[in-house]
Image (cartoon, helix red, strand yellow):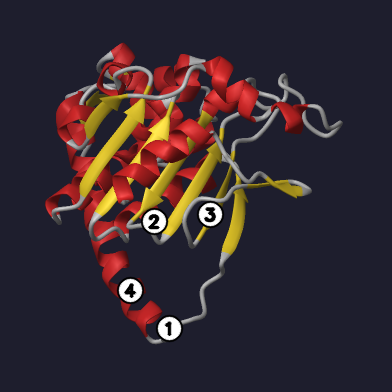
Amino acid sequence: MAQDTIVGDLTSLGLTKNEAKAYHSLVRLGKSSASIIAEDSGIPRSKVYETLGLLEKRGIIKKVTGSDPTLFDPAPVDAALDHLEEKVKSSATSARKMLKGIQSLRGKEAKEFAWAVQGMEQVIVGLRTAIESAQEYVYIASASPTLLGHLRGAFSAAKSRGVAIELFTTTPGSQEVPGLEHYLTVTIAMPSKDLLMESFKEVFQSPPISPEEFEPTRMLIMNVDGRESIGVFLPGDDTSQPWALHIRSRLVVLIQWQVVKTVLSGVEAIIQNRMS
């Protein structure tokens, strides 16, 4: 499992799966021959020399001069990962410039009033997009602020633009997400779980939703400049996908067949008071 995680992280930095496996093995083994690397990593012997050659071109391993059989030596982890990270950043910068130019040619498009997304990556990108559009403030209310750890970059950029970012929660978000306090102000003020459950009592009495399926204390509510509101619903287990509802107005969250007129009334009051 640890190997799968490391290989996955390395592929996100631009390595192929075989390259990631080979570098991982070299870090663990130290200087090694191609046959030992193949055996340790599970890379087919027919592919190992090609893989090592690609890693050598990337500059994160080197051949040991004069060794017989040829040994391969990994660059130190910090130097190798910094090098890969810079390559990814450079590629992202170049792609961003070109794609934004292409995007601008489309002109302005009519924007949806409301839309929903499902899946953690879709939720995170949606939140990031909203934060990056903020000009004045981003207000967040949540009893589960750990999701915000994925948004540090967007928070940092917004703060540099002078955007006020505030989190209203039951617990200090900076304790759950180290470093979060650098980007936003944390206010400990939110209704208790019992009050939140009471707010959704009528919804729970309807067959499609039950307290076991939907946990209101695992919501995150975000308002951006008073013009876009987002309700994020985090599942209580791994059997369901998180989902989010975006609305281009003050917060009204739609849940399946009905409009919940007062969504977490205490939380909404906090946000509305801040906007008034």
Secondary structure, mark 3, is: strand
Label 1 belongs to which residue?
Answer: 108
In percent of the image, x 21 and y 22: which residue is there? Answer: 67
Q: Which mark is residue 129?
A: 2
When the figure is inspected, residue 251 is found, relative to residue 62, above or below; the finding is below
Whole-number angstrom distance, CA of label 1 to CA of label 2:
16 Å
Q: Amino acid at mark 2?
A: Thr
The label nearer to you, 3 versus 1, is: 3
Q: Secondary structure at mark 2?
A: helix
Q: Earlier in the sequence, mark 4 or mark 2?
A: 4
Spatial CA distance of label 3 from label 1 is 19 Å
Tag 1's secondary structure?
A: loop
Q: Residue 175, relative to residue 64: is it above or below?
A: above
In this view, which residue lies farthest toward the top? 29
- N-terminal of the pair, mark 3 or mark 2, is 2
10 Å neighbourhood of mark 3: few (<14), some, or many (≥20)? many
Hey, what amino acid is under mark 4?
A: Lys
Residue bearing mark 4: 100
Q: Which residue is mark 3?
A: 246
Q: Position of residue 111 (x, y in %)?
A: 51, 73
Q: Indicate whether 172 appears above or below 125.
A: above
Which of label 3 and label 2 is nearer to you?
Answer: 3
Q: Earlier in the sequence, mark 1 or mark 2?
A: 1
Residue 91, given in percent of the width and then of the height, sits at 28, 58
In the foreground, 57 or 230: 230
Q: Nearer the viewer, residue 119 or 51?
A: 119
